[in-house]
Every structure is written in C-alpha cells, then in structure tokens.
Amino acid sequence: MGLKKYLLRDHIAFGVLIGIITPILMYGIFVLINIVTATDIRPNGIFRFRTVYVLSVFANMLPFRYYMVNLKLDYTGRGIILVTILLAFGYILMGVPE
C-alpha cells in the first residue's frame, strides 16, 4: 500500500491516530521553542504550560479541516475531532497547572 493511498483512508481509527500524533508533535515543537528562548528573566521560555497545551490541542484543527473540507473524508475527520474534544474536556476537568 502506497503512502498516498494510506493517507487517504476514510476510517475513524485513522482519524484518532492523526488526532493523537498532531498534538504530540506540536507539543514537542513548542517545548523546543521554550528551551531555545529561555533566559535569566524568563527561565521557562516564552510560553506557559497552559498555552503550550491549548496550542497543541488547537493544532488538530489543521488536519481536521484538510480531511473534512478538502478531501471529504468524514470518518477520518470525526476521529480527529473526537480526540480534540476529549483533550479539551481533559483540560477543563483536570485543570492544567501553571
């Protein structure tokens, strides 16, 4: 199975996989930005942990829009939004420390 054919699958499990991988990748990018921008004045970098979490979860909207609007793959989009909603509820219910 070619990579292009694999990425065009319309399955909810594939959407869940994308919905999990995207925030993890974005979280890593934002943590690296924080490490690079850490100074004596701001030892934790330019982003607070809450901001990094919210931006990482919001990053799911990019593949969601691509799969729902451009490719018309509804089940994949539903999987992405399912993970996004669960992460948002987790943020609200458990809270995220400063």
Image: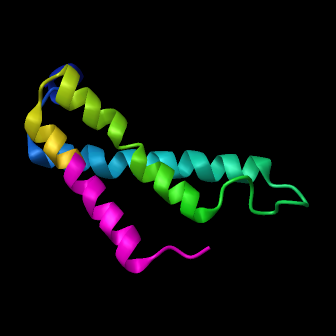
Instruction: Return the x and y of residue 91 as percentages of the image width and height.
Output: 40, 69
Q: Which residue appears at 89% of the width and 60% of the height?
A: 41
Residue 52 drawn at (x, y percent): 55, 55
Secondary structure mostly taken by the magenta-highlighted segment of the chain = helix
Image check: 53 left or right of 4?
right
Q: Quadrant of the C terminus?
A: bottom right
Quadrant in which the N terminus is drawn: top left
The answer to whether residue 73 is left or right of residue 24 is left
Residue reaching furthest to the right = 40
Q: Residue at the spot x=87%, y=55% of the render?
A: 39
The answer to whether any part of residue 3 appears in the image is yes
| Highlighted range, magenta | 81-98
x and y percentages locating residue 23 in the rendered image: 41, 50
Whether residue 96 is in magenta: the answer is yes
Residue at 27% x, 27% y: name it: 66
The quadrant in which residue 68 appears is top left
Where residue 54 appears, as percent x and y from the top left, is 47, 56
| Above or below, comparing residue 30 to residue 96 in the picture | above
